[in-house]
Image: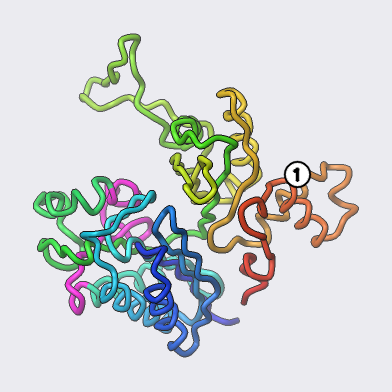
């Protein structure tokens, strides 16, 4: 069996074509690595890159692309809709075939140590590579973003896992780790009002929101901690954003375990919540790649128990694309979006 690792680094540049091509080119130049997708977003000012290959080769490509980005992206001038802590915001290693999660944790550590030493970029470890429970969640590490990083580095509780506490003005910090396959899934609304999208995000994301009393004050427990009202969906992170290109609001979702909450479940929940707020979900998009099984699950759901057994995988996939509105903003081409078709 081939040993295959996926890496999905997120770079804080979605507008400058030369920078994006330099990053992509650095990955193409590594043997035993296949570049699967490069997806820049001008509103997020962010580019999600996906590549796969043998473990050591993937780690080398991650390092080279980080170096290329660090040379070209200046975080002191960066602005965009998506939260970020550095020029290379997050670099996850994902086991695909013949590789364990533990091996991906080792890759994240070797990558992080090398980047901190050679490029002077502070490194935080997250998800399965986290060294403490507080650093498991990417959003927790990213809190305060690049603008709050200088102060964060001075807090002993936020000493980097690799590198110094010196603030790198140009590159910020990078988060790396090992995780399950994540689907970046966004649902489009028929309104430009980002506050509606944010309200939906607060209702559905697992972490929910702080509980407030009748006067609007946050309720605290006996330890002085905020009491949370959990959202309706498990293994889901979400936020509301405005997409200037299309003049619409969008619920930006990370499905951190798509077998627990697949895209169609997230979509239908957003449909429900949007209607309760006088809005409509009009379609959705997958940023990066998706496993085929996620689309087949959606196809079976929309076909119904009686019809699912009578149609082919191709038909199930087509049904999922149609009912989820995956081609509303950009054409959804399975050959370029389904990971099994890319390997």
User: Residue 33's x, y, as percent?
Assistant: 49, 83
Please state if 333 lies on the left or on the right of 29 as rendered.
Answer: right
Q: Quadrant of residue 330?
A: bottom right
Pick the front one: 287 or 209:
287
Residue 93: in magenta span = no
Q: Quadrant of residue 226?
A: top left
Residue placed furthest toward the top:
214
Query: At 37% from the left edge and 64% from the top edge, which residue is drawn?
Result: 13
Disc 1, SS: helix
Residue 127: in magenta span = yes
User: Residue 62's x, y, as percent?
Assistant: 37, 76
Mark 1 highlights which residue? 301
Please state if 217 lies on the left or on the right of 25 as rendered.
Answer: left
Magenta span: 116-142
Please state if 166 lies on the left or on the right of 254 as rendered.
Answer: left
Query: At 62% from the left edge and 65% from the top edge, which residue is drawn?
Result: 337
Answer above or below: position of 294 versus 304.
below
Query: At 51% from the left edge and 40% from the top edge, which residue is drawn?
Result: 249
Please state if 90 lies on the left or on the right of 252 as rendered.
Answer: left
User: Residue 244's x, y, as percent?
Assistant: 47, 47
Which quadrant of the figure contains the C terminus?
A: bottom right
Answer above or below: position of 83 versus 3.
above
């Amino acid at each position: 069996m081939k040993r295959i690792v996926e890496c999905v680094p997120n770079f804080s540049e979605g507008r400058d074509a030369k920078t994006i091509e330099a990053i992509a080119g650095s990955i193409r130049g590594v043997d035993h690595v296949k570049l699967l997708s490069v997806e820049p977003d001008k509103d997020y000012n962010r580019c999600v890159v996906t590549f796969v290959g043998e473990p050591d080769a993937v780690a080398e490509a991650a390092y080279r692309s980080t170096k290329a980005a660090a040379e070209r992206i200046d975080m002191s001038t960066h602005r965009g809709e998506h939260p970020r802590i550095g020029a290379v915001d997050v670099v996850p290693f994902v086991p695909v075939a013949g590789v364990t999660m533990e091996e991906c944790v080792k890759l994240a550590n070797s990558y992080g140590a090398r980047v901190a030493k050679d490029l002077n970029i502070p490194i935080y470890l997250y998800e399965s590579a986290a060294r403490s429970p507080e650093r498991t969640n990417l959003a927790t590490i990213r809190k305060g973003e690049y603008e709050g990083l200088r102060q964060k580095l001075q807090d002993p509780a936020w000493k980097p896992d690799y590198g110094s506490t010196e603030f790198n003005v140009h590159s910020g910090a990078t988060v790396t780790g090992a995780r399950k396959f994540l689907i970046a899934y966004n649902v489009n609304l028929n309104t430009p009002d980002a506050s509606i999208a944010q309200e939906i995000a607060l209702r559905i994301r697992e972490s929910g929101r702080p509980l407030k009393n009748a006067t609007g004050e946050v309720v605290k427990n006996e330890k002085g901690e905020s009491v949370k009202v959990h959202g309706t969906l498990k293994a889901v992170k979400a936020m509301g954003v405005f997409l200037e290109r299309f003049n619409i609001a969008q619920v930006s979702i990370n499905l951190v375990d798509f077998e627990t909450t697949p895209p169609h479940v997230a979509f239908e929940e957003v449909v429900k919540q949007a209607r309760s707020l006088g809005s409509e979900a009009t379609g959705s998009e997958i940023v990066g790649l998706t496993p085929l099984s996620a689309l087949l699950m959606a196809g079976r759901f929309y076909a119904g128990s009686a019809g699912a057994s009578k149609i082919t995988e191709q038909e199930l996939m087509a049904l999922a694309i149609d009912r989820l509105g995956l081609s509303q903003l950009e054409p959804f081409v399975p050959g370029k979006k389904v990971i099994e078709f890319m390997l």
